[in-house]
């Protein structure tokens, strides 16, 4: 079944992509949730015209995403966490914690656009997260998880 995505769908595609999915997934989930519409020939023509009109606006958005990417590369984020024996954390650090730390530094990024390899961090040390600012702009963001200073 061919569908046109109305919104970004993780592990499937971005808004305005034409994707092929199994009939049940399209009929029972994507279409009722408002995430996609059937890719009829007339819908494809309308999509092509809309994409042509959006092309010059898109360039401005990509430029802004690249500027944000450069500012993110300059950031040096250290996330403090409670540590047990050795370098093992109590709990874990996730994309939510990283999004909060980046927001404290002055840049707001939605947690759903941040992906940490392995999902969550359980030990101290340097890590890399992928931040998707735009479909064409993905940044490898370096950060450190450090031991929280113990208070007496």
Image (spheres, rainbow, N blue to C red):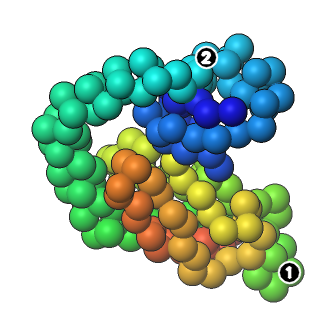
Q: Where residue 6 appears, x then y in whole percent?
A: 50, 25
Q: Where is residue 96 shown, x and y percent of the image? A: 61, 47
Residue, far front: 41
Q: Secondary structure at mark 1?
A: loop
Task: Name the mark on residue 85.
Answer: 1
Q: Nearer the viewer, mark 1 or mark 2?
A: 2
Question: Picture coordinates of residue 55 (x, y %)?
Answer: 20, 38
Q: Secondary structure at mark 2?
A: loop
The residue located at (66%, 68%) in the rendering is 117
Q: Which residue is mark 2?
A: 34
Residue extending furthest toward the bottom:
86
Q: Nearer the viewer, residue 42 or 81?
A: 42
User: What residue is drawn where x is 40% and y is 50%?
Assistant: 135
Q: Nearer the viewer, residue 115 or 81?
A: 115
Q: Position of residue 133 (x, y in %)?
A: 38, 50
Look at the image and tell me whether residue 149 can be seen: no
- Which of the 4 image quadrants contains residue 1? top right
Q: Is residue 146 visible?
A: yes
In the displayed structure, 106 sits above or below 125; it is: above
Q: Quadrant of residue 52?
A: top left
Q: Is residue 95 left or right of residue 5?
A: right
């Amino acid at each position: 079944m061919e569908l046109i995505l109305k919104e970004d769908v993780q592990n499937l595609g971005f808004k305005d992509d034409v994707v092929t999915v199994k009939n049940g997934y399209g009929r029972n989930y994507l279409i009722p949730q408002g995430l996609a519409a059937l890719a009829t020939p007339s819908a494809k023509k309308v999509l092509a015209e809309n994409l042509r009109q959006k092309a010059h606006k898109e360039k401005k958005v990509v430029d802004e995403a690249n500027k944000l990417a450069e500012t993110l590369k300059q950031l040096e984020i250290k996330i403090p966490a409670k540590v047990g024996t050795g370098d093992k954390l109590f709990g874990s650090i996730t994309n939510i914690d990283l999004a909060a730390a980046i927001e404290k530094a002055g840049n707001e990024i939605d947690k759903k656009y941040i992906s940490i390899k392995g999902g969550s961090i359980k030990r101290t040390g340097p890590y890399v997260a992928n931040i998707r600012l735009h479909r064409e702009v993905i940044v490898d963001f370096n950060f450190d998880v450090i031991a929280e200073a113990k208070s007496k």
